[in-house]
Image: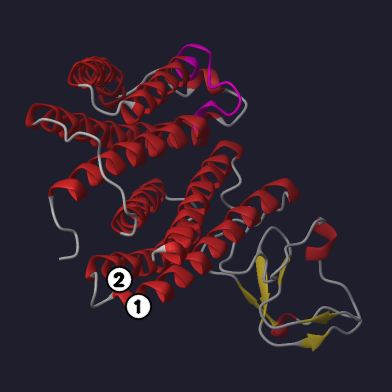
Amino acid sequence: MYKNLQRWTRISLILVYLVIAAGATVRMTGSGMGCPDWPKCFGYYIPPTQVEQLAWKPNTTFRKGNVIIDKERLLVASKTFTSSEGFDASLWEPYTKHDYALFNATHTWIEFINRLLGALSGLSILILFGFSIKWWRKKPIIFIFALLSLLGILFQAWLGKTVVDSNLLPIKISLHMLMALLLVGFLLVVRVASKSFGLSKLPSREIRMLLYGTFALTLVQIALGIQVREFVDLQVERWGYDLPQFWLATPELNFYLHRSLSLLVISSNVVLYFWVVKAQIERIFIQRILWLIGGEVALGIAMYYFDFPFATQPLHLVLATLLFGVQLYWILRINLHRYDLSL
């Protein structure tokens, strides 16, 4: 009955999480400006692999929008033309949205893959929305949240453009991340509302309240973590990628709050685990939650005490979004059992 909805919701969720992982890799490698324009990359749908491809050449056809690097600045072809033996400045316009004019093939392709995954997730959500249309009368919640997912991915694409145009302004990167979490939430609602299942036993009010409380703590931790990441980004800009030992040498208050609150997150979820075991209800979700929290704590320790070992920062972010997803999915399943989600 819901086969196509479930398939495309699952595919969309996987792709959105891959985009989150790719975005985290972009930040880890400093590849955010690997493509200095948007939606193309140096004015091409398939980005260059060598810096020579971005140099002016005589007797060469340049299409409107193609970008070259000339004297440490970006120039954009104002129309399609074939160059003559000499450089004609009237055929080129300076790129004015920022002054970043460097090329690194590795950074360019990491950023390009990130954008490609974003485009694939957008296509998947568009297909999901198409299948949701027939449910707008029978079960409006499916249609509504599929529509919100579609609008959300379009807004996310626009946010991606603003991130590039701002030359990676930290606050815009944070908004980009928060929108990704909203997308996960929208898709999870569609997933739960289109799936027929029940709980073997409904959790007690006390367990539900503790679950909601631990979820709220996760949201606070994510908010604090985003602020810590903004601070780290500024330190990376100050010290460079080769000196990670200085990134958290003098952390702000938000870091200490983030670190201390993790103790409350751990303890509250351990209590939740024992309550779930005692009540003899399904424990798969709380088990996954504890594993994810354990991974988060281990990665946090590694970043602070061992100077950001390779991949710890993106993995920390990905585990946080997975934790958010598992907790929200559990909450939605419980409430599907308690309320009629057909609206």
Q: How many marks?
A: 2
Quick check: is 210 in the magenta stretch?
Answer: no
Q: Give the range drawn in magenta.
A: 302-313
Residue at (43%, 59%) from the top-left corner? 6
Q: Which of 268 and 299 is in front in this view?
A: 268
Q: Nearer the viewer, residue 96 or 338?
A: 338
On the picture, is 222 further left or further right than 272?
right
Picture coordinates of residue 222, whole percent (x, y): 31, 35
Q: Name the quadrant of the C terminus.
A: bottom left
Tell me which amino acid carries mark 1.
Ile
Is 336 rendered above or below residue 199?
below
Picture coordinates of residue 109, whole percent (x, y): 70, 52
Quick check: is 308 in the magenta stretch?
Answer: yes
Quarter occupied by residue 280: top left
Contact? badges 2 and 1 (CB < 8 Å): yes
Label placed on residue 327: none
Q: Name the residue under label 2.
A: 143
Residue at (34%, 52%) from the top-left corner? 188
Residue at (71%, 84%) from the top-left corner? 91
Picture coordinates of residue 72, whole percent (x, y): 69, 58
* Secondary structure found at label 2: helix
Q: Which of 232 and 176 is in front in this view?
A: 176
On the picture, is 202 further left or further right than 235?
left
Q: What is the residue that sits farthest to the top in this orientation?
A: 305
Picture coordinates of residue 67, whole percent (x, y): 70, 70
* Secondary structure found at label 1: helix
Label placed on residue 133: 1
Q: Alpha-carbon neighbours of circle 1 within 10 Å: few (<14), some, or many (≥20)?
A: some
Is 43 rendered above or below residue 205?
below
Let me know if residue 3 appears in the view. Answer: yes
Q: How is the image coloured?
A: secondary structure
Q: Distance between the residues labelled 2 and 1?
A: 6 Å
